[in-house]
Image (cartoon, grey):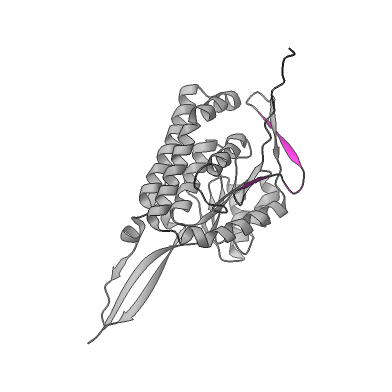
Amino acid sequence: MSRRSLVAKTYKLYLGGAFVRSESGRSDPATDHAGAHLANVPRSSRKDVRDAVKAARGGFGGWSKRTAYNRGQVLYRFAEALESRSDELARAAVAQRDASLAEARAELGAAVDLLVHYAGWTDKLSVVMGGINPVAGPHLSFSTPEPTGVVAVLAPDEPDVLGLVREIAPVLAAGNTVVAILSRRWPLRGLDLGEVAGVSDVPAGALNLLCGRMDELLAPLCGHRDVNAIVDATGDPSLAVTIDELASETVKRVSRPTPDTDPLSRLEAVMELKTAWHPVGT
């Protein structure tokens, strides 16, 4: 019997709950730490960005209207699914980034823990961020937190999985939908995370993952009028100027969290406070 050939994996974008090839038909090589070829990854185009934003906007209504408890359960299920593939993804990190297996497992464990952590935040946001406002007059005033809408996430290059989860988890926990551009240097495990989301309970459109060249994707994503906020975790000062200029055209909120940014600050950056006034009897 002849020796069979292994089936090479085809990496695809994750848009609207489906795995799709780039509209452009282009691809880029993904290499390991030594420059050896590992796979070809889709090179997202401007059309892919528009499709991702459209999917995110279409998924926003359903995701934001779910109960806080249900959103927490979905994120917890996401964590379960990631845990089930953590050993596989850790070994992939060893091959790709020349990380030690212990370091890779620690990173995946931290990513799982983050998802569980933010799952616990979902039903506490209204208590922590909202409340009754003291006013002088015959009125009752109260504020409640609401999701911002569609949030663009620019993921850091490293750590590829933990860095991505660190940025998308609070956005999803707050009831927003995500369009993320993955690590340019290490995109493979970010695309693997899309496969994890695809077998968990994350609804179609809530999470959308693009990969490609930042200089091609930045303007169509950050300048898109249906994107409400931007989370820039790249740490690149040269990109910051361009992002701010694009965001100013449609008055988008821009946040630049660091690994040390606390969870509440991350949540506040992608939420709005709605304040209501109601007259009371005299």
Residue at horizontal 29 percent and vertical 69 percent from the top? 132
Residue at the top extreme of this rendering: 1
The answer to which of 120 and 32 lies nearer the viewer is 120
Magenta segment:
18-31
- Asked if residue 109 lies left or right of residue 44, the reply is left
With 245 as the anchor, is 134 left or right in this view? Answer: left
| Residue lying at the far front of the rendered structure | 1
User: Residue lying farthest right?
Assistant: 25
In the image, 43: left or right of 245? right
Q: Position of residue 266 (x, y in %)?
A: 43, 52
Residue at left offset 72%, top offset 18%: 4
Q: Is residue 23 magenta?
A: yes
- The magenta stretch spans residue 29: yes
Residue toward you, 188 or 219: 188
Residue 120 in the figure: left or right of residue 90: left
Give the image quarter of residue 92. top right
